[in-house]
Image (cartoon, rainbow, N blue to C red):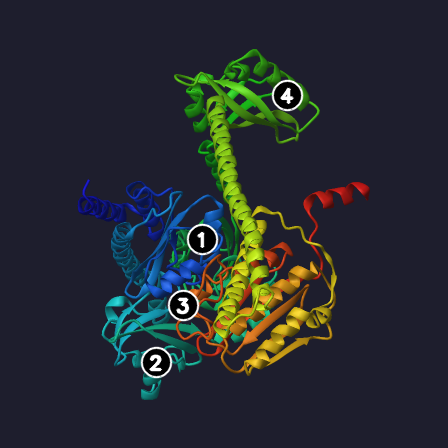
């Protein structure tokens, strides 16, 4: 299929999926599966990062911040980000990370990985980017639509609340009032719309200005002069203002009374003759999730689902009480099922509200039944003799039978062989002395292509209301078939063979490099020896031109010998042939080492300031002294190549459970892109404007540093700024990590 046709089809699929998806995460998951097939990826990881505080890896953050895809078609242990290294260790060789953005905001990330190298060329990345843009636009439209719906739901919920609320325009004229507000001002809706808030509350021009700016104000009621209300406001639009009113007067008067009921499980209320609430105990906030001040002024009949019936019952009892169940509307789509007791005291009422625990228990039992019925595991209910009283839907689907057909039959009839039937019988015998039997393997009878279904079955006892055993509940999980297990075993064997083959090839290459490098040392040694003899005049007098040529030969021999020795080190490290000679090493001794001192002298000859500082708190470390010196020498030598003026300083200090060594120079610095690759084999930064000789360096020194530090269980890194210098650092643990077999030996000896 042509690429343009394929992309067109994928875009069409994404648009269809957008309509069917419940949200961005669902859309990403479904779209990722389509891309996995279309672009031959072994895995597609789709992440939703639209929410605030979404967790992102370093690579994710990089592509979201840059807005550009990141591609690595040769994953390795030296890839730019930790997660790419993890992909490499999991067997993947190529990775493409593409951001999903809309309106300048990061919404998601698509990560495609493949076990083939060079899997994601420019055309594939551009195609995925186009699809990411389509997904981003669709997701953005969904998010904006949901925001609009949430705003609409908010105002709907607000006006269904029992709290007095009202919408006014900028002049203070009432546009709409909810039931709580109408009860408060004792007016029907037809008489309120269009009238000004000043008719019902004492509000000055300054108060209206404060309200328009969102500042709270206090105002007296025109109907109840002794009551003060706090009015808080928020802008609904350029023209409309949403007000919320709270009565502050009676709350203060009843505060002391409220303390008597704060810790009880029942809410107490005082009502007037019209069932309007005058006071509510403070524990209503804990039990009903509603502030008691918000209940004051609300009629109880406005909160229940059957107001006419409650009104009729209240009027029909001269004195005494009624107790009934009720469903309270607490506003904002919140409801509570309660037990309500109403007591008449002359012309007023008292009310006690408590949680309806009986209804909650019944609801919990229904939920438990639903969980069993729709569980993915096989569930079988039996009496004490093993006679089936019911099975769930998963059992019907897996075993190919109906619950009504199995009722009254023995559970052993579901077993496919006599061995499984015997296990069931033994389990019933054990259940007489135990509460459960776990991990029982059974071959159960199936239908069609699966006549035998392996199941891991657990039995638990069921108790009656008196605590006596009434039966059993069998819960079984279907296992993989034997064929699937054999296929998996075969595939595992093939993977192990491939791993051995690849390791053998890698070892062969490493050994070849080692042998070639080792064989080159012999002729180079002879060339160097004879050249020195000629330079010293052992074979006769030589001219100045001949002397210069011989010195050049010796210099090139030394450089080539250094290169060969570094290649041998790399080969040994790769093959694991280097064995560390661990001793207790003092950094003060390393400071006095001849090679380190020679580098210091070389730095001073170049006009550079050079110093080594070892902090007094630095203890000895378990390390190979020669290899540790090699690391420090390599880092100082590297700094000398890139520093024309200024200084080179080596600082050694203790940091937690490690010793940290830093080599800081004032050289040309290293670009951020180059910093990520510095410790790779044979990698060298661009040599433009460098102070080193054009032919100097092999690109192996820093990779050797990394391998040696890793062998010691330490870490290595670099921080740098172009034009200002660099700091190369490494750490050595104060305690050498023991290998697993050593730990096991010590445990056995202990």
Residue furthest front in the image: 540
How far apart are labels 4 and 1 at the CA level? 51 Å
x and y percent of residue 363 in the render?
A: 48, 41
Mark 4 burial class by Cα count in 10 Å: few <14, some 14-19, many 20+? some
Whether residues under marks 4 and 3 lie with C-beta atoms below 8 angstroms apart, the answer is no
Q: Earlier in the sequence, mark 1 or mark 2?
A: 1
First in sequence, mark 2 or 4: give its number. 2
Q: Earlier in the sequence, mark 3 or mark 2?
A: 2
Distance from the alpha carbon under mark 3 to that under mark 1: 25 Å
Q: Residue at x 41, y 25 (%)?
A: 397
Residue at position x 55%, y 83% in the image? 607
| Quadrant that contains the N terminus | top left
Split into 4 quadrants, where in the image is the C terminus?
top right
Whether label 1 touches label 2, CB < 8 Å: no
Q: In this orientation, does residue 361 appear?
A: no
Disc 2, SS: helix
Is tag 3's residue or tag 1's residue first in the polypeptide sequence?
A: 1
Determine whether the residue tagged by mark 3 lies in a helix, strand or loop: loop
Q: Which residue is mark 1?
A: 84
Q: Which residue is mark 4?
A: 427
Residue nearest the observer in this picture, 679 or 547: 547
Numbered marks: total: 4
């Amino acid at each position: 299929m042509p690429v343009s046709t394929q992309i067109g089809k994928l875009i069409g699929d994404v648009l269809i999926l957008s309509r069917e998806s419940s949200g961005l995460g669902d859309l990403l998951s479904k779209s990722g599966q389509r891309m996995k097939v279309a672009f031959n990826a072994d895995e597609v990881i789709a992440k939703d990062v639209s929410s605030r505080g979404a967790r992102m890896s370093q690579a994710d953050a990089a592509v979201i911040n840059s807005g550009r895809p990141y591609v690595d078609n040769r994953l390795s242990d030296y890839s730019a980000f930790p997660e790419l290294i993890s992909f490499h260790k999991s067997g993947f060789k190529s990775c493409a990370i593409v951001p999903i953005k809309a309106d300048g905001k990061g919404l998601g990330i698509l990560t495609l990985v493949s076990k083939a190298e060079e899997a994601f060329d420019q055309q594939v990345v551009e195609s995925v980017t186009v699809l990411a843009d389509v997904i981003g636009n669709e997701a953005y439209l969904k998010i904006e639509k949901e925001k609009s719906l949430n705003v609409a739901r908010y105002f709907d919920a607000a006006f269904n609340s029992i709290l007095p609320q009202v919408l006014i325009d900028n002049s203070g004229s009432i546009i709409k009032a909810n039931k709580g507000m109408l009860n408060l001002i004792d007016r029907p809706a037809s008489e309120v719309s269009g009238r000004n808030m000043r008719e019902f509350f004492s509000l000055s021009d300054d108060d209206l200005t404060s309200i328009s700016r969102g500042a709270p104000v206090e105002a007296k009621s025109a109907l109840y002069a002794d009551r003060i209300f706090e009015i808080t406001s928020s802008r609904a639009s350029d023209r409309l203002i949403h007000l919320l009113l709270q009565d502050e007067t009676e709350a203060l008067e009843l505060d002391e009374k409220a303390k008597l009921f704060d810790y009880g499980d029942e809410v107490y209320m005082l009502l007037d003759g019209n069932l309007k609430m005058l006071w509510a105990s403070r524990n209503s906030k804990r039990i009903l999730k509603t502030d008691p001040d918000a209940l004051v002024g609300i009629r109880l009949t406005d909160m229940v689902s059957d107001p006419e019936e409650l009104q009729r019952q209240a009027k029909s009892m001269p004195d005494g009480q009624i107790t009934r169940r009720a469903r309270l509307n607490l506003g904002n789509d919140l409801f509570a099922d309660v037990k309500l007791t109403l007591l008449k005291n002359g012309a007023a009422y008292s009310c006690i509200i408590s949680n309806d625990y009986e209804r909650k228990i019944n609801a919990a039992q229904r939920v438990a039944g639903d969980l069993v019925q729709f569980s993915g595991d096989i569930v079988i209910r039996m009496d004490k003799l093993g006679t089936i009283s019911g099975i769930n839907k998963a059992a019907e689907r897996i075993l190919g039978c109906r619950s009504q057909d199995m009722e009254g039959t023995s559970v052993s009839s579901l077993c496919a062989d006599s061995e499984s039937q015997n296990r069931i019988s033994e389990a019933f015998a054990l259940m007489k002395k135990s509460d459960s039997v776990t991990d029982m393997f059974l071959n159960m009878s199936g239908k069609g292509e699966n006549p035998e279904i392996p199941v891991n079955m657990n039995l638990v006892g069921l108790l009656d209301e008196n605590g006596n055993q009434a039966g059993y509940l069998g819960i079984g999980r279907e296992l993989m078939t034997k064929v699937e297990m054999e296929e998996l075993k075969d595939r595992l064997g093939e993977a192990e063979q491939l791993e051995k083959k690849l390791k053998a090839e890698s070892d062969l290459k490493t050994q070849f490099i080692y042998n070639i490098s080792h064989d080159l040392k012999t002729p180079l040694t002879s060339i160097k020896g004879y050249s020195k003899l000629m330079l010293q005049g052992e074979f006769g007098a030589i001219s100045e031109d001949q002397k210069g040529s011989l010195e050049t030969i010796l210099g090139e021999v030394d450089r080539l010998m250094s290169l060969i020795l570094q290649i041998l080190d790399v080969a040994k490290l790769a093959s694991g042939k280097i064995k560390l000679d661990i001793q207790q090493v003092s950094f003060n001794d390393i400071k006095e080492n001849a090679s380190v001192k020679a580098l210091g002298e070389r730095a001073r000859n170049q006009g550079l300031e050079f110093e080594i500082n070892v902090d007094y708190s630095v203890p000895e470390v378990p390390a190979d002294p020669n290899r540790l010196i090699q690391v420090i020498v390599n880092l100082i030598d590297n700094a000398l190549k890139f520093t024309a003026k200024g200084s080179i300083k080596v600082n050694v200090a203790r940091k937690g459970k490690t010793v940290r060594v830093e080599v800081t120079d004032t050289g040309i610095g290293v670009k951020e892109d180059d910093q990520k690759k510095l410790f790779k084999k044979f990698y060298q930064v661009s040599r433009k404007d460098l102070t080193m000789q054009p032919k100097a360096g092999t690109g192996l020194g820093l990779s050797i540093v990394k391998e040696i530090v890793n062998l010691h269980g330490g870490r290595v890194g670099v921080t740098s700024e172009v034009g200002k210098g660099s700091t190369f650092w490494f750490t050595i643990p104060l305690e050498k990590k023991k290998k697993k077999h050593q730990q096991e030996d010590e445990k056995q000896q202990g």
